[in-house]
C-alpha cells in the first residue's frame, strides 16, 4: 500500500444528517460512497474527512499524507475555516491534487484557486444530462464511452464564471436545453485541479459506473508527479558569463 495514491475524500456531511431523502441515497454519506469505491481500485487508498471534525479533518498530518484531495460541499461553504483553506491551498501549490465535485464550485478553496465568483445558473428538475467527452485522448476520459447519460440530475448552465480551463474534458447538455463545461482541468503551482460537475445529493450519481470511472481516472491524473522541483529567486549562472 506504500506505493498507492493516497486520497482524502472531504464532505460537509450535513445533507445526509438533515434530509431523509439524501440519507436514503447515501446512508453512509457521499464521502464514504466515493471512498468505498476508490478503495476497490488498484493503487488507490482512500480515507475520509468531514466538516465537524477538528480542523475539518484536514490537519497538517492528514494533508501531508494526502496525494489527492476530493472536495464535496454545498450548504456550509462559509463554515470552512480560512486557516484550513490556506493550508489546503499551500499543499496544492506544493503538488497535492484537488478534485472539486458538483456544488463545491462555490467552495472557498475553488474560488481562491480560480480568482473568480465561480457562479452559474441552476435548476432542480430531475432532468436528463448527457455528458459528452470532448477530449477523448485525455487520461480522465480513458475507458469511457463517447458520452455518459445521467437519467436524473440537477442542471447547471452557462455562463460558468471560471477562468478558461487549461483542458476541457467534458461538456454537458441537459434536457431543458442548457449546456455546461462539466470537466475542467487546471494547473496551479505544482498541483493539478479537476472540477467535475455531476453529483447532486438526492440522486445516486456517485454509484453510476461511468461516473465512478471518471473519479478514479481523475485521481490518477491529479496525483503528484515525480518531476524536478522549481528553482525560484536569484541563481548563479550555469555557464561562464
Image: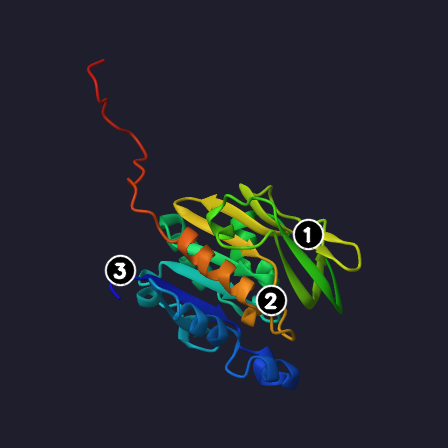
Looking at the picture, does residue 108 appear above or below residue 203?
above
Residue that badge 1 annotates: 180
Looking at the picture, does residue 52 appear above or below residue 173?
below
Residue that badge 2 annotates: 199
Q: Do the residues labelled 2 and 1 touch (CB within 8 Å)?
A: no
Separation of marks 3 and 1 at Cα, in angstroms:
36 Å
Q: Where is residue 163 in the image (x, y as percent from the top left)?
A: 60, 43
Separation of marks 2 and 1 at Cα, in angstroms:
14 Å
Residue that badge 3 annotates: 3
Tell me which label, 3 or 1, sits earlier in the chain: 3
* Other residues around mark 3 within 10 Å, as few (<14) / some (14–19) / many (≥20): few
In the picture as drawn, the residue positioned furthest to the right comes out as 176
Can the viewer see residue 83? no
In the picture as drawn, the residue positioned furthest to the top comes out as 241
Looking at the picture, does residue 115 appear above or below residue 204?
above
* Other residues around mark 2 within 10 Å, as few (<14) / some (14–19) / many (≥20): some
Q: Where is residue 79 in the image (x, y as percent from the top left)?
A: 55, 70
Amino acid at each position: 500500500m506504500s506505493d498507492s495514491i493516497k486520497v482524502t475524500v472531504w464532505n460537509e456531511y450535513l445533507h445526509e444528517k438533515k434530509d431523509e431523502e439524501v440519507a436514503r441515497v447515501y446512508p453512509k454519506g457521499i464521502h464514504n460512497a466515493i471512498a468505498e469505491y476508490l478503495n476497490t481500485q488498484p493503487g488507490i487508498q482512500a480515507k475520509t474527512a468531514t466538516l465537524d471534525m477538528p480542523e475539518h479533518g484536514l490537519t497538517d498530518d492528514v494533508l501531508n499524507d494526502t496525494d489527492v484531495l476530493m472536495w464535496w460541499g454545498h450548504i456550509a461553504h462559509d463554515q470552512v475555516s480560512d486557516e484550513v483553506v490556506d493550508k489546503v491551498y499551500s499543499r496544492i501549490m506544493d503538488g497535492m491534487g484537488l478534485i472539486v465535485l458538483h456544488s463545491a464550485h462555490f467552495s472557498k478553496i475553488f474560488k481562491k484557486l480560480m480568482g473568480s465568483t465561480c457562479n452559474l445558473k441552476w435548476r432542480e428538475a430531475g432532468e436528463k444530462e448527457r455528458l459528452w467527452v470532448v477530449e477523448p485522448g485525455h487520461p480522465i476520459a480513458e475507458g469511457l464511452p463517447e458520452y455518459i447519460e445521467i437519467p436524473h440530475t440537477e442542471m447547471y448552465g452557462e455562463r460558468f464564471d471560471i477562468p478558461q480551463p487549461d483542458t476541457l474534458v467534458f461538456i454537458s447538455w441537459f434536457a431543458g436545453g442548457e449546456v455546461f463545461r462539466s470537466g475542467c482541468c487546471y494547473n496551479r503551482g505544482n498541483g493539478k485541479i479537476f472540477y467535475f460537475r455531476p453529483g447532486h445529493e438526492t440522486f445516486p450519481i456517485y454509484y453510476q459506473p461511468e461516473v465512478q470511472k471518471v473519479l478514479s481516472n481523475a485521481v490518477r491524473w491529479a496525483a503528484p508527479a515525480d518531476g524536478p522541483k522549481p528553482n525560484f529567486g536569484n541563481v548563479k549562472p550555469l555557464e561562464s558569463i
